[in-house]
């Protein structure tokens, strides 16, 4: 019985955090709150997950939940990997544009510092 209280409290805290985020769109909040509501129902009525699992061809409710969580995590990882690579390519374009602008503003290669090394981009390392 204690585990139900812990799980429901955790789900409620996650829901509160999602609702408190002001920049989240209503559709995003809904997409988070829907699985939280389903998870709360699974905590309150654990036998219902077994019933749904048997209808889906899975032996136990916990196995069905495990499969669904694995799929969700795989989607999240792939989504954020795609976002990361997109941001990386955007940053590359921005750095190239910045370098070209600096070169166009200072065609002689002097930036006012000693030996022309002022605010130039330095190689990492």
Image (tube, rainbow, N blue to C red):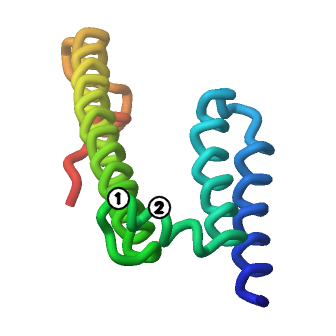
Label for residue 56?
1
Vertical placement of 25 versus 63: above or below? above
The x, y position of residue 98, in whole percent, is 31, 22
Vertical placement of 105 versus 72: above or below? above
Residue visible at 23% across and 32% down in the picture: 89
Q: Which image quarter holds the C terminus?
A: bottom left
CA distance separating discs 2 and 1: 6 Å
Can residue 117 be seen from the camera position used here?
A: no
Q: Which residue is mark 2?
A: 52
Q: Nearer the viewer, residue 55 or 79?
A: 55
Vertical placement of 105 versus 80: above or below? above
Residue visible at 77% across and 62% down in the picture: 13
Please tell me in which quadrant of the rendered image residue 116 appears: top left
Q: Which image quarter holds the N terminus?
A: bottom right
Please tell me in which quadrant of the rendered image residue 19 appears: top right
Q: How many marks?
A: 2
Q: Secondary structure at mark 1?
A: helix
Do callouts 2 and 1 mark residues in contact (Cβ within 8 Å)?
Answer: yes
Residue visible at 69% across and 63% down in the picture: 40
Can residue 77 be seen from the camera position used here?
A: yes
Q: Nearer the viewer, residue 24 or 101?
A: 24
Residue visible at 71% across and 47% down in the picture: 18
Residue lying furthest bottom: 2
* Number of other residues with Cα within 10 Å of mark 2, as a class: few under 14, some 14 to 19, many 20 or more: some
Q: Is residue 105 left or right of residue 2?
A: left
Vertical placement of 28 versus 76: above or below? above
The x, y position of residue 63, in whole percent, is 38, 75
* Number of other residues with Cα within 10 Å of mark 1, as a class: few under 14, some 14 to 19, many 20 or more: few
Q: Secondary structure at mark 2?
A: helix
The x, y position of residue 109, in whole percent, is 21, 22
């Amino acid at each position: 019985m204690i585990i139900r209280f812990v799980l429901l409290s955790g789900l409620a805290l996650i829901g509160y955090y999602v609702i408190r985020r002001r920049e989240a769109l209503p559709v995003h909040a809904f997409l988070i709150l829907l699985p939280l509501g389903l998870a709360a129902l699974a905590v309150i009525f654990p036998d219902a997950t077994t019933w749904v699992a048997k209808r889906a061809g899975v032996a136990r409710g916990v196995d069905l939940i495990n499969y669904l969580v694995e799929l969700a995590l795989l989607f999240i990882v792939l989504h954020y990997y795609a976002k990361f690579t997109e941001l990386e390519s955007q940053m590359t374009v921005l750095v190239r544009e910045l370098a070209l602008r600096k070169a166009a503003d200072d065609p002689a290669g002097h930036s006012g510092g000693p030996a022309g090394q002022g605010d130039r981009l330095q190689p990492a390392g």
